[in-house]
Every structure is written in structure tokens, then in C-alpha cells.
Image (tube, rainbow, N blue to C red):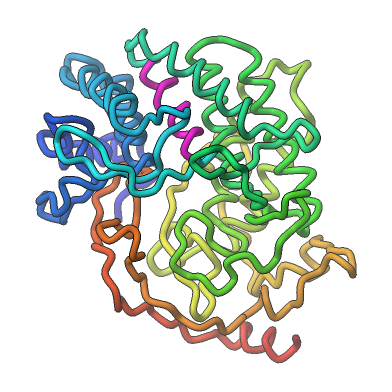
Amino acid sequence: MPDFRSPAFLLDHIRHTLAFYDGRDIDPSGGFFHYFRDDGQVFDTRSRHLVSSTRFVFNHAMALRQFGASERPNDLEAVRHGLRFLQQAHAQAQGGYAWMIDWDGQRASVEDGTQHCYGLAFVLLAHAHALMAGASEARAGLDATFALMEQRFWEPAHGLYADDASPDWQVSSYRGQNANMHGCEAMLAAHEATGDEAFLARAVTLAEHIAQRQAALAGGLVWEHYRSDWSVDWDYNRHDNANIFRPWGYQIGHLTEWTKLLLQLEARLPEAQRPTWLLPTARHFFDRHAAWLGRDARRLGLRQRPRWPGVRWREVLLGAGRKLRRRGLDGGAHGRAGVLGLVRPHLDIQLGPHDRPPARRLVLQARQRQPCAIRPQESRRQDRLPHDGCVLRRVARAGVALTRVRPTPARRGVARAR
């Protein structure tokens, strides 16, 4: 078994992953290819998603910063190549960036022009890391993207960003934590790249309002979906297993990401400005819930969601756990048996009687399983975007069966008690 705590192993794994894309990912006509088979073959040369277009910039910038120009001599030009494509192909005349485009090698046709704050957060992240990698021209794009997020999505009354808008900037009624989580990540990167304290202050605001205020509405954990007044929407996408950007339920991967962000904030802020809740909340999210509920004892790693019948899952990295260990805290899962019911008082999770969702929605809800179907409007889309630069090992296609897990006796006991 590999030693996942070994820096040497992790660096070797990163190099191995980067080697897969080297010489394959850059499209000389513009941007990057997004869709690869296990053997490295590009199976779709035209479809471009904003998240992938920005994440490839991030990957090359991080690789250059980690390993240096002597080992990675082509990464800086790859970063600039990716930034040019964002402006050439994704950027729209009315402002913002197209979510999905078809690139024919010379021009882009918009397939989905929805404006997503989630997407802008990744545009901001890409420019911040490009700037840190040595692309000084990225500063203008960084400032412009932040200004656009403020103009179109910031809601001062709630201290959070709205989620999406039509191509002509009519903001929808949906609100979500995910755009704000990645907004927090991008603000931290922008602060690191520029030293501007405004970005750090905004990251603290986003973290406090999601990890404290909104979590208090949902039993002390981060719920994904909200209404326009930021009240909890317990039912949004409850029957849609195929939406990878707005999944239903508590997400173990997002609790892990918030753990990482809170610990980064705790390390970045001067002691006199450091909120006392940062470290306890990070430990609450990871130790008490993410690492306990999401632990996969057989395959190791963490599941994205509790592995209940009919729920898809994926493994996530344990970077947050390593950060907790460096702080002298237990980054492992709690050893006691049981299933997190999410409304159970023995876990110190309390919901008001009027805010509490039916327990059956949170414990062993036998939802109808759905295939990882290709959406008609995104006929060439992949089933997972390379958030971490990993090799895409599965091609989305209609009819893929999902594994049903047999409930344990403890789970059946919870089900009988509802």
C-alpha cells in the first residue's frame, strides 16, 4: 500500500499525472483538449467547458511553481495559451464567460451561455495562479473578474454571492454554497498573488457566512442548496443523481474542502485578526463528520457522499486531514460504530422543529437510481471534470449502472426507526 503521508510519494504521483497530459492537452488552435480516454486518446476535440478551461491553466501554473522552470520549461507558455483562449473563446461581449462552447479551431459557438458565479470563481483562480507563475499580464484579468463578480452576483444584504444568471444577466432565484466555497478559494489565491487585503477579507466573510451562519440553519453542517432569501431548500435536486455541479444532500467532499479553506485562513490571518471559530469548525467538519461518515475502510480515502443505497460517490483527497495533523489534531475518523442520521442529538446536531427535514430524506432514503445520462444539450460532455487534473477513467454514456450497496444492520436499524 502506498504511503499517502509521504511527500515523496505524493510528488511522484503528481508527476505521473502531469506526464499523462504532457504533449496531449494543448490544442495548438486554442486552449486545451478536455476529453481523454485512459490511453491518452482525445475522443472529443471541440467541446470546451469553462471549468476545465480554467483548471488546465491552474494545473500548469501549479506544476511550474512546484517543480520549477528547469523541470517544466513549457508550463508558462501553456498558462498564457490558456488565458488567451479564455478571452478569445469563452469571454462574451455582454461580459462574463460562456459555460460551454464548441470550438472548431477558429471560432467558438456558444452551447450554454449561462453565467455562473461558480465559473467566474475558477476564472479568478486561474488568473491568480497564472500571476503567481510569472504571467504578469494576468493581473488585469484578475481585477476585472473580481469586479464582475461584485457587480453581477454580490448580495450585500446576505454577504454572499448569488449563483447564476441568464446570458443577459437576469439572476435566478437559486442560491448555492458551492459558488461561495470556490469563491473563497479564489479569494485566498488572489490575496496570495497580489497581497491585497480586500481579497482576504472577502474570503473571511464568505467562510463565516457559509460555515457559521448557513451551517447553523442545517444542523451545523454545510447544506448545498438555498432559496433566494438564503433559507435552506431541502428538496432541490433530490431526485437528480446526474447533476455533478448541484448534487443533493450533504457532500463529504465539500466538508473536506471547507476544512482545507478554514485551515488556510487560520494560517494566513494574523493572530490578532484570527476568528476563534476557524479551527474548531474545521475539526467539526472533518473529524466529526467527513472522515467518520465518509471513510471507506476497504478502498481507503473518502466518499463524496454517505454510501447509502442509490447514492453515487467518488473518492476525494485527504489534504485537509494532513493539515489537521500538522496542527496537532486527530485527522482520522472516529472509531465508534454507527450511522450519521444528520438529525441525531448524540452527535450534537440540532435542527429546530420547523426547520428539520423529514428524517427519511436524510437517512436511507431509497431514491430511484438514475444512469449517468448524457444531457441532450451537452452531448459530448464528460462525466467528471478534471478538478484535480486526474485522468478521466470513465466516459459518460447513457445506461451506466450504479452499484447498489447492501445496508448494514446498523443502517437497517436506523431505517426502521424513522
Question: Residue 121: within the magenta?
Answer: yes
| Residue at x 56%, y 38% (from the top left corner) | 169
In what quadrant of the picture does the N terminus appear?
Answer: bottom left
- The image quadrant of residue 360 is bottom right
First to last magenta residue range: 119-131
Q: Which sits in the foreground, 219 or 118?
A: 118
In what quadrant of the picture does the C terminus appear?
Answer: bottom right
Q: Which sits in the foreground, 53 or 261?
A: 53
Q: Which sits in the foreground, 130 or 142?
A: 142
- The image quadrant of residue 26 is top left
Decide if residue 161 is on the left or right side of residue 68.
right
Residue 275 locus on image (x, y percent): 77, 28
Decide: is 211 above or below 311: above
Q: Is residue 4 visible?
A: yes
Decide: is 20 above or below 342: above
- The main secondary structure of the magenta stretch is helix
| Residue at x 74%, y 36% (from the top left corner) | 208
